[in-house]
Amino acid sequence: MSTTSAKSATSSTDVTRAEICVVACAEAWRGDGEMLAAAMGTCSVLGARLARLTFEPELLTTDGGPLLTAEAVPLGAPAGPVEGWLPFRDHLWLVQNGRRHVMMGASQIDRYGNTNISAIGAWSRPKSQLLGVRGAPGNTICNPTSYWIPKHSTRVFVPKVDMISGVGYDRAAELEAELGVGASRFHDLRRVVTDLGVFDFATPDGSMRLVSVHPGVDVEQVVAATGFELVIDGEVPQTRQPTDEELRLIREVLDPRSLRDREVRSLRDREVPSLRDREVPSLRDREVRA
Amino acid sequence: MGVVMTTEEIVGSLESGMTIGIGGWGSRRKPMALVRAICRSPLTGLTVVAYGGADVGLLCAAGKVSRVIAPFVTLDSIALEPHFRAARQNGTIEFTEYDEGMFMFGLLAAAHRLPFLPTRAGLGSDVMRVNADLRTIRSPYEDAEELVAVPALTLDAALVHMDRADTRGNGQYLGSDPYMDDMFAKAAARCYLSCDRMVAPGELDGPPQTLLISRMHVTGVVETPNGGHFTDSGHSTDGGPGRDEAFQRHYATSAADPQAWTAFTDRFLSGDEDAYQEAVRRWHEEETTR
């Protein structure tokens, strides 16, 4: 495939929100080097592969299944040439080993980055049973973790999660106090990307900070969609635009069928999410990993 | 060494109240023919140990389960398992919810006759809150690190489905992921194997690393063609049965509505395995001519 033939993708005016999100997800893996980029959800998977194709070429990525692909492959494409094998058992060992940065989904997240994918309501008899904790406890305590949340709302961004599946900064600090210094030394929540903005935990007490808002989103909108107090210092910058090369890779190579637009819909549709969309982290078949 | 048995003989050798491990992962290579046979049996009060999918759902729907031990229950391409959700939300089952890695360590401990194995996974999460009998253990070495002691998941019986097996009970998988099936076999006092195709000893062709299960761990083996239906064999790219997505959707839709579920059980689950396979074949015929 020629890198120059296609007429250029684009001007920044026709960049979609989904494409902004893909690049914001990709940025989560910047600087990681040679480790597994484990991703869940369309924009997150695209982000991992885009990072590998551009600024983070040493990353390892999968076919969405147990194969480590020799090159980053398009969404849903066959693995093609393979450079490694990572069946579930080895994936779970890799969590313990730590050379893995996972970007998970969350049905609920609180200000310290505790997340819930297990159940809504009282755990003993939930109002809504979701997936179960899956690999979230081990992921968050053993290797770097980020989150991709396609629909930012007060239903997801809550004061307190009902069941802590993924461990947040307040719990990590409690562990240090209870079990001794170093007990949470591998706990490392990096960033949260949503359809509205980018967040991190670079605050003295590890509470969530608004890093940037996506183009077309204002800070008030983010605040209104968040059920707890966000740390906002000074002027909040805009999330960066994709480069022309990134847009070309997203549109022509990684996701020519525009599956990203099904995950991040236009703003017009945001007001009426379905019940399932509200409660379940975005999960595609075969992208459901530990 | 395994002996060739029928599904009815295998299920007849199980007892109410047993702890039964089920191989596969989510909606992948589940021993569904054996699960369907349990649903037809008088067994009750089972503790089911699984990376759960429709196996757990069907057994819950049939009233066979008193406790589920799992890190998740999912149909993969459909995120949530309707029968498991209903059982949890109606309070009809107990649930032991572990992280995926903890769960594997529990199997590994049982497979190696250890009382527990230590891991960081679980620390700081509500897995420790909802499983009040989980204990931590301090490293006896200089680091003195405190870790979760995951108790052995010792099984009375394990059920796993292989692509092929020989009449002695050696099992072979042809997909790209062995899941934890060999660990289930070793963690169990008795392991029963179902397989798509049974061959004579010495006739399991293919690379030796595909020979996942050894006869030394197997009590009984049965040929159940397409017995993993509707779950994914994991090698549909080379002609193996893929997940029957259309039928899985029919299952999930029916499961969400009591009347539809009655119709589903009448049509598909009221006879033996041959009747099931025939009913599914007819259903597909109707769907394609509609």
Image (spheres, coloured by chain):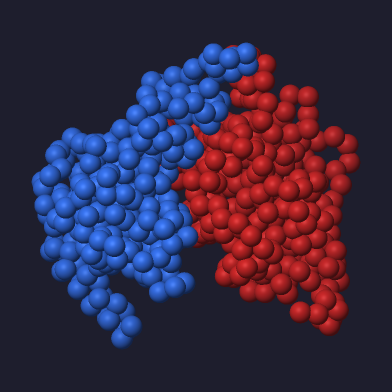
Q: Who's the residue at 79% across and 71% down the image? A: A248
Query: Residue A29: horizontal and vertical position, in percent?
Result: 74, 48
Check the rendered structure and report the hue given to chain B. Answer: blue
Q: In the rendering, at what x and y percent does residue A241 appear?
A: 84, 59
B37 versus A158 height, above or below: below
Q: Residue furthest front?
A: B202
For the point 53% across and 58% down, the residue is A65
Rendered residue at 79%/68% (across/down): A247
Q: Nearer the viewer, residue B100 or B72?
A: B100
Q: Residue furthest right?
A: A235
Q: Is residue B18 left or right of residue B132?
A: left
The chain displayed red equals: A
How far across and how far down the image is residue A106, in percent? 57, 44
Question: Does residue A204 appear in the picture of this structure?
Answer: yes
All told, the count of numbered labels is 0
Where A12 falls versus B148 (above or below)? below
Which residue appears at 37% of the width and 24% of the height? B115
Judge whether A35 appears above or below B225 on screen.
above
Q: Which of B84 and B151 lies nearest the eye of the viewer?
A: B151
